[in-house]
Image (cartoon, rainbow, N blue to C red):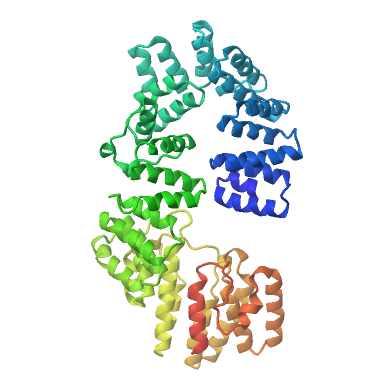
C-alpha cells in the first residue's frame, strides 16, 4: 500500500503505511527502501541514509536501495559513498542508465570532463533517448570548446523535442547574440514561464553550472523564487517591500535549501512562510508549525493566517478562530468568509455562521458555492422554509462528483416533512416527502439509477404519516417498500443507518424471525460496520465513524421518530 500511495503522490498516507509495515518487521526490505525514498523526498536525508544502509545490510546488491543510497549521499556531499551506490546500481538493467547519468553528473561537478563524458555516453547504451545524458554531453563539449560535437548533440535534442529549452539556451551560450537569445526566450509561452526558467536554472545548478544557472534566472520573468535564487547566487539582500506574496508558491526541495541559507541573513516572515509551505508538503509538520508560530501576527497577508489555521487544525478553538478572523479582517472576500463560516459550523456556532453569511448571499444571489453553504447553515438553524426557497432559486452548474446540492435539497424537504408530521399536518408532510424524491435540474445533479437510490427513510416517514391518518393499507405498502428497497439498493450507495428502518419495518409487520435472518445476513456482509451492535443501542450515536457524513441526517430523523 505504501508504494501505491507514493505512486499516487499521497505521501503523508504512504509514510503512515510504511511506518506500520516496518513496525511489524523492521527488516522488511521493500518497506525499508520505500521509506528511504520517501525520506529523501521529504529532505530528511540523515534518516533516509540510515534506512538505505539497513536495506543494503540485508541485500548489498539491491539495485533500488543502491541507487537511492547514491542519491542520498550525493545530497549529503558524501561523494565517494554516492559513487559506490551508483556503481552497484549499474549492474541492474533497470537502473543502469539512470545510475550512469548520476555518475556523469558527479564527475562533471568535479571538473573531470573525460570521465563525465564516458559515463554520459554509457548512459545512452541502455536508453538511446536519455535526454539528461545528452544534455550533460552538450555541456562537456561546450566546456572543452568542441562546437562541432556540441552542435550534433544539440541538433539531436531538437530533433527529439523542437522546443527543448536547454538546447536553445546552449545555442545562445555559444553565439551570445540577440537572435539566439530571442529563439530561446520566445519558445517559453506557457502560463507560468518563470517556472520553466526556474526548472532549467536549477538543473544547471544541480550539475555544478552555477554561472549558467545565474544567466537563466537573469533572463526569467520576475518571480519570488527567481528573486530568492538570485539573492543567494549574488550574495545580496532581498528587498521584501517589492514582493507581492499573493501568487508565490515555492515548492522545490532545492529552493527550500536556498531559503534556509537566506534566513541566516534576513529573518523575514515571508521566507519562513514559504519554507513552512514546503515543509508541510514534505510532511514535516512540527517544523512547519514552528516556522509559522515564529511569524507571530507580523504578516499583513490574509492567506498566511488561513494557512496557519489549516495547519493548526488540531489546535485549540480560540487559536484557529483568531487566525481565521484575522484573515477575514484583512480580506473579506468569499474565500475567507467561507473558511470562517465552515469553522463556525465545525464548532457548532451555527448562529454566528448565519450572521456572517446572510448579507453576502443576498448581495451575491448567483454564487452557488456560497449559496449551498448558506443552505446548510439555514438547516443547522432550523430555518427549513428559507433553505427550501434558497435551493429552489439557486442554479448550480453541474460538475463531476457533485452530490452536495441534492443532498441539501433532500435534507431540507425531509426536515420540512418531519416538522409537518410533528405538527400533525400529515398531508403536507407527505407532499414534502414526494418532493424529496425529486431531482430538480437547477441543482446540477442528475438522477442516478434506481438501484443506487435508498428511499427507506422517506418511506418510513410516509409510513408514520399514513399510520397517523389511519390509512392502514398505504402504511403497510410503505413497510413492504422498505423491505424491498433494503434488498435492492446497491452496496455502492447504501445508507447503513437505514438498516435500522428495515428492522423496524419487519417489527411493525410482526416478522421478527425474518428480521433476525435478514439482520444476520446484513451483518455478515459488512462485518466491519458492527451493524447489530449499534442497532441494539438506545440511539444511533454509536454508528461507526467509517460511515458517510450523509448518515447524520438519517440518524437525527430516525432518533426523533423513535421518540415520537
* 488 over 419 or under it: above or below: above
Q: Is residue 167 above or below residue 193?
A: above
Q: Which residue of the protein is positioned furthest toward the front in this rendering?
A: 264
| Residue 149 picture location, percent across and down | 54, 8
- Residue 554, how many percent across, how many down? 51, 76
Q: Position of residue 211 (x, y in %)?
A: 42, 19
| Residue 407 visible to an observer of this rendering | yes
Q: Nearer the viewer, residue 281 or 502?
A: 281
Q: Residue at x 42, y 30 (%)?
A: 198
Q: Quadrant of residue 200?
A: top left
Whether residue 8 sits left or right of residue 245 in the image: it is: right
Above or below, 242 relative to 472: above
Tell which of 425 and 104 is nearer to you. 104
- Relative side of 159 to 218, left or right: right
x and y percentages locating residue 195 in the rendered image? 41, 33
Residue found 66% across the figure and 42% down from its top:
51
Horizontal arrangement in the rendering, residue 524 relative to residue 144 (left or right): right
Amino acid at each position: 500500500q505504501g508504494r501505491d500511495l507514493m505512486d499516487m503522490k499521497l505521501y503523508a498516507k504512504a509514510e503512515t503505511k510504511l511506518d506500520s509495515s516496518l513496525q511489524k518487521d523492521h527488516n522488511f526490505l521493500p518497506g525499508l527502501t520505500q521509506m528511504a525514498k520517501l525520506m529523501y523526498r521529504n529532505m530528511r536525508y540523515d534518516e533516509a541514509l540510515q534506512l538505505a544502509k539497513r536495506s543494503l545490510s540485508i541485500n548489498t546488491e539491491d539495485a533500488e536501495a543502491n541507487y537511492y543510497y547514491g542519491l542520498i549521499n550525493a545530497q549529503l556531499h558524501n561523494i565517494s559513498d554516492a559513487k559506490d551506490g551508483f556503481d552497484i546500481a549499474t549492474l541492474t538493467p533497470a537502473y543502469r542508465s539512470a545510475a550512469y547519468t548520476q555518475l556523469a553528473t558527479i564527475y562533471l561537478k568535479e571538473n573531470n570532463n573525460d570521465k563525465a563524458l564516458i559515463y554520459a555516453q554509457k548512459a545512452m547504451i541502455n536508453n538511446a533517448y536519455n535526454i539528461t545524458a545528452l544534455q550533460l554531453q552538450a555541456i562537456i563539449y561546450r566546456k572543452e570548446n568542441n562546437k562541432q560535437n556540441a552542435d550534433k548533440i544539440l541538433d539531436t535534442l531538437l530533433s527529439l523535442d523542437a522546443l527543448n529549452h536547454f538546447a536553445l539556451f546552449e545555442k545562445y551560450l555559444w553565439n551570445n547574440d540577440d537572435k539566439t537569445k530571442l529563439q530561446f526566450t520566445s519558445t517559453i509561452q506557457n502560463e507560468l514561464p518563470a517556472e520553466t526558467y526556474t526548472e532549467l536554472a536549477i538543473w544547471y545548478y544541480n550539475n555544478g553550472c552555477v554561472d549558467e544557472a545565474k544567466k537563466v534566472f537573469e533572463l526569467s520573468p520576475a518571480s519570488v523564487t527567481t528573486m530568492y535564487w538570485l539573492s543567494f547566487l549574488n550574495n545580496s539582500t532581498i528587498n521584501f517591500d517589492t514582493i507581492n506574496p499573493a501568487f508565490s508558491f515555492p515548492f522545490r526541495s532545492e529552493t527550500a535549501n536556498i531559503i534556509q541559507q537566506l534566513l541566516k541573513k534576513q529573518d523575514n516572515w515571508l521566507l519562513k512562510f514559504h519554507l513552512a509551505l514546503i515543509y508541510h508538503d514534505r510532511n514535516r509538520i512540527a517544523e512547519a508549525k514552528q516556522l509559522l508560530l515564529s511569524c507571530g501576527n507580523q504578516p499583513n497577508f490574509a492567506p498566511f493566517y488561513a494557512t496557519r489555521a489549516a495547519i493548526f487544525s488540531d489546535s485549540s478553538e480560540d487559536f484557529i478562530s483568531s487566525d481565521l478572523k484575522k484573515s477575514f479582517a484583512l480580506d473579506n472576500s468569499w474565500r475567507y468568509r467561507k473558511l470562517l463560516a465552515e469553522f463556525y459550523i465545525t464548532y457548532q456556532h451555527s448562529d454566528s455562521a448565519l450572521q456572517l453569511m446572510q448579507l453576502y448571499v443576498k448581495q451575491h444571489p448567483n454564487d452557488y458555492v456560497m449559496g449551498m453553504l448558506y443552505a446548510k447553515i439555514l438547516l443547522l438553524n432550523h430555518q427549513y422554509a428559507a433553505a427550501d426557497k434558497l435551493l429552489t432559486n439557486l442554479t448550480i452548474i453541474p460538475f463531476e462528483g457533485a452530490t452536495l446540492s441534492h443532498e441539501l435539497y433532500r435534507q431540507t424537504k425531509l426536515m420540512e416533512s418531519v416538522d409537518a408530521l410533528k405538527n400533525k399536518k400529515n398531508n403536507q408532510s407527505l407532499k414534502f416527502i414526494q418532493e424529496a424524491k425529486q431531482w430538480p435540474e437547477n441543482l446540477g445533479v442528475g438522477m442516478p439509477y434506481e438501484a443506487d437510490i435508498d428511499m427507506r427513510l422517506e418511506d418510513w416517514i410516509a409510513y408514520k404519516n399514513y399510520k397517523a391518518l389511519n390509512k392502514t393499507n398505504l402504511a403497510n405498502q410503505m413497510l413492504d417498500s422498505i423491505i424491498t428497497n433494503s434488498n435492492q439498493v446497491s452496496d455502492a450507495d447504501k445508507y447503513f443507518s437505514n438498516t435500522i428502518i428495515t428492522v423496524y419495518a419487519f417489527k411493525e409487520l410482526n416478522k421478527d424471525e425474518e428480521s433476525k435472518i435478514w439482520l444476520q445476513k446484513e451483518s455478515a456482509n459488512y462485518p466491519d460496520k458492527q451493524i447489530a451492535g449499534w442497532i441494539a443501542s438506545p440511539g444511533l450515536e454509536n454508528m461507526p465513524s467509517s460511515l458517510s457524513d450523509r448518515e447524520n441526517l438519517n440518524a437525527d430523523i430516525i432518533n426523533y421518530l423513535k421518540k415520537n
